[in-house]
Image (cartoon, grey):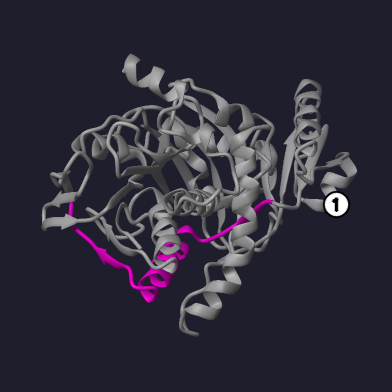
Amino acid sequence: MASVIVVGAGIVGAAVARALAHEGHAVTVVERGASAGGTSASGEGNILVSDKALGPELDLALRSTELWRALEAELRAELPRDAPSIEFEPKGGVVVATTDDGARSLLAFAARQRTAGVVARELGPDEAHAAEPHLTDAVVAAVHYPGDAQVQPAIATEALLASARLAGARVLARAEVLAAAPGDGRIAGVVTSRGTLRADHVVVAAGPWSAAVAERLGSSLAVLPRRGVVLVTTRMPRTVRHKVYDADYVGAVESGAAGLQFSGVVESTASGTVLIGSSREQRGFDARLPTEVLRGLARRALALFPCLADAAVMRAYGGFRPYAPDHLPVIGEDARVPGLWFATGHEGAGIGLSLGPAELVADLLAGRPPSLDPAAFSPARAGLRTAERAA
C-alpha cells in the first residue's frame, strides 16, 4: 500500500480520502482552512443526472449516483448512531419549459439522455401540476427525472472524513501547501505551513484553488473559479416537492460565457427552507453579493413558483466553483509530475460527482481497470492543454 496526501478537505477530497483509506493506503488530508469550509459549504447539495448531456460527464454522474445510493447505508453502518444524517433525499427532479422553443429543446435533450439509460419521463402541463401543484401555469412541457437527489453537503463531507478517519486517515487542518517536497524525479510529498509531509502520491482536490496548488507543486492546471449565489428562505410549509428548474439551466451549465447568467432553480430542504438559484459568473475570487444577482435569482424563482412572492429570504450565500474550460472534471495523474494527481474541475456538480472521481482515482492508483474510461478526464487531454497554453 502507498502513502497519499490529499490536498483539500471539501467533499471531493473527503471522498478520495475515504476511498483510498478503505483500501489500506496511508492517507493524510491537508486543508488550509477548516474541513467543508470552501465550495462544499456553499452549494445546494445536488446529485443530478438531469443536466448532463450525453458523454463522459453523464457516465460519471450515473456511476456517482449509484455510489451515493449505496453510501447512505454504508455510513450508517460505519459511523456512531448519533452521527447526524447526511439528509440524502432521492426526491427526483422536474425540468420545466415555458415556451414552445424551450419545450422542443428540452424534450430532444431528454430523448438523447434516454439512449444512455437515463430515466426521463415526459410530462404534459397537467401532469407537471400534479407533480408540483404550485408550479406556474405557463408550463408548456416538463420532464421528470426520478434519479435526481439531494444531500446536505457540509454534513456529507464531514461524514466521509469521519469514515476515512475510522479507516486510518488523518486530517491536518489549517496547513497551507507551499511547495512540493523534493524527490528523485517525482513528487515526494508537500511542504506546508506546518512542516513537510512525505508521501508516494499527492492528490490535488482543492476545488477552485486547484490551479494555485498545482503551480506550487510544479505543474499547471486550467481550472478557474466560477461564482454562484443561492438564496435561502425561512422555513415554510412544503411547497416544492422535487428539485425544479427551468430548461435554461442546462444551457447555463454548458456555457463558457464569462458574464453573469441566470436560470431558475428551486427546491425544498429537509429542514423546511427553500433554496433558490442559480447564477454563474466568472469574476475571480470576488466574494461580494451584488443586488443585481439577488434580484435576478428572485425573478427566475417567481417565474417558476409565483407563490413564493410572499416568502421571506433569511440569507444569501455565494461560492466559487472549479470550472474547467472544456466542462469536464480533471481526474488522474499529471503526465509532467509523476506522483501528482488531480480530482477537481467539477464546477457546480462537485457534490453529486464526488464519489465517482474518488473511485476512479483509487482504481488508477491501484492499477486496476476502472469502471469508466479515464481518458476524457485526463489532465493531459487536448482541451485542457489548449486552455493552459492560452492562459
Res 117 quadrant in image? top right
Say which quarter of the image contains residue 290: top left
Whether residue 242 sits left or right of residue 300 in the image: it is right
Residue 309 in view, yes or no: no
Q: Is residue 168 left or right of residue 47?
A: left
Give the magenta range: 148-176
**In terms of secondary structure, where does tag 1 sit?**
helix
- Foreground pick, 122 / 15: 15
Picture residue at 83% right of the left edge, 32% below the top = 140
Q: Is residue 206 above or below residue 113?
A: below
Count the marks: 1
Would you say residue 179 is visible in this rendering?
A: yes
Q: Nearer the viewer, residue 13 or 141?
A: 13
Residue depicted at 60% across the width and 73% down the height: 73
Q: Which residue is mark 1?
A: 130
Q: Is residue 365 magenta?
A: no
Question: In this view, which residue lies farthest toward the top?
Answer: 390
Lateral position of residue 289 relative to residue 240, left or right? left
Please say if 115 is above or below 268. Answer: above
What is the quadrant of the N terminus in the image?
Answer: bottom left
The reply, left or right, for residue 250 in relation to residue 38 is right
Front residue of 216/124: it is: 216
Where residue 294 sits: x, y (%)? Answer: 46, 37
Give how far across and how far down residue 351 sits, in percent.
50, 51
Residue drawn at 55 percent across, 60 percent down: 151
The amino acid type, in three-letter code, at marker 1 is: Ala
Would you place residue 382 above or below residue 330 in this image? above
Q: Local crowd at mark 1 within 10 Å, few (<14), some, or many (≥20)?
A: few
